[in-house]
Amino acid sequence: MKELVSFEHVTKIYNRKFKALNDVSFKIGEGMFGLLGANGAGKTTLMKSLVTLNNPEKGRIIVDGYDTQKQGLEVRNIVGYLPQDFSIYPNLTAYEFLDYIAQINKINNSKVRKNKIEEVLEGVNLWQVKDKKVGGFSGGMKRRLGIAQAILKDPKILIVDEPTAGLDPEERIRFRMLLTEFSQNKCVILSTHIVEDIASSCETIGFLNKGTLMYFGSPVDFIEKVRGKVKEFCISDRKEMLYLKNTYEIISERRTSNGTFIRVIGDNLLNEVRGTLVEPNLEDAYMYYVKYDECREENIKHA
């Protein structure tokens, strides 16, 4: 698999003391890559560095052979970007908006531009509303328009930052399918704190926490690291609930006619005689890495 993006010891410091990124290194190629982390973990800072919107204090980022700090124009020509806060012009129609973006991207031939706009509008399922003003679009339609503008120039690398935040389940599924389809023979970087988006679409993931890359590899291996650390308890009284809350990290709670079932994670669950060990999932692993500081350093896995 061809290497398309390489982060090499990237460090970004704000206000001379806050390390938004701390010596981040990994490499990715074609397909869907998921960058997972809580809000404030450093994901957006890393993505902005990749698209040349800011420069790291240390390290470098290589995009298809180009250095982001020395060859920014070349990088921007091959990268499409959908930021978390995507701005639109509400009084323009979808077609007019994309026509404007296409001209900014120097697609100057009117026939080529027309064909490309029609192609991307069909691809994101917005052709039927091409003549409607985008100010009246739903959240999901606006995000799909955002993808359309990002892929107009047919980039080798597509970066989407928190693309499904605020979308309903149907729109989220549609959006993930759109990204997966585009990732054929290209690189798509999906940056999100929504575990479900990563679990259903990415073959490789990275996990950022407080600016540090804590994991890089497959979702399967990420999950495997919390095997034996997830249990489910059926509780019947408040005292047991308080014990679990004070002792472990609670992942979920569901009430049934047979009682209340609590799913927890922790390091010493094998010593807990109560409860039933359950098969871990990506959400369990994510919560474990976020909450349990003492285990992080030994679990770091770089490319």
Image (cartoon, helix red, strand yellow):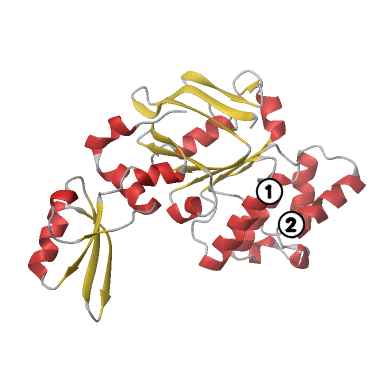
Q: Position of residue 232 (x, y in %)?
A: 24, 62
| Residue 246: image tag | none
Label 2 sits on a secondary structure element that is helix
Q: Which residue is mark 2?
A: 123
Q: Does 184 sit left or right of 199 as displayed?
A: right
Task: Check if mark 2's residue and mark 1's residue have beta carbons within 8 Å.
Answer: yes
Along the line of sight, which residue is nearer the eye, 82 or 220? Answer: 220
Residue at 49 percent across and 60 percent down: it is 166
For residue 162, above or below residue 300 = below
> Residue 30, can we see it?
yes
Label 1 sits on a secondary structure element that is helix
Q: Does 15 sit left or right of 31 as displayed?
A: left
> Residue 55, can we see it?
no
Q: Position of residue 165 (x, y in %)?
A: 49, 56
Along the line of sight, which residue is nearer the eye, 20 or 297? Answer: 297
Residue at 12 percent across and 57 percent down: it is 273
What kind of residue is marked 1? Phe
Along the line of sight, which residue is nearer the eye, 276 or 197? Answer: 276
Residue at 66 percent across and 22 percent down: it is 65
For residue 241, above or below residue 148 = below
- Quarter of the image for the N terminus: give it: top right
| Residue 182: image tag | 1
For residue 252, above or below residue 19 = below
Q: Does 272 sit left or right of 265 as displayed?
A: left
First reached walking from the N terminus: tag 2 or tag 1: 2
What kind of residue is marked 2? Gly
Along the line of sight, which residue is nearer the eye, 280 or 169? Answer: 280
State the separation of the CA atoms marked 2 and 1: 9 Å
Dot 1, how many residues are within 10 Å of its Cα: few (below 14), some (14-19), or many (20+)? some
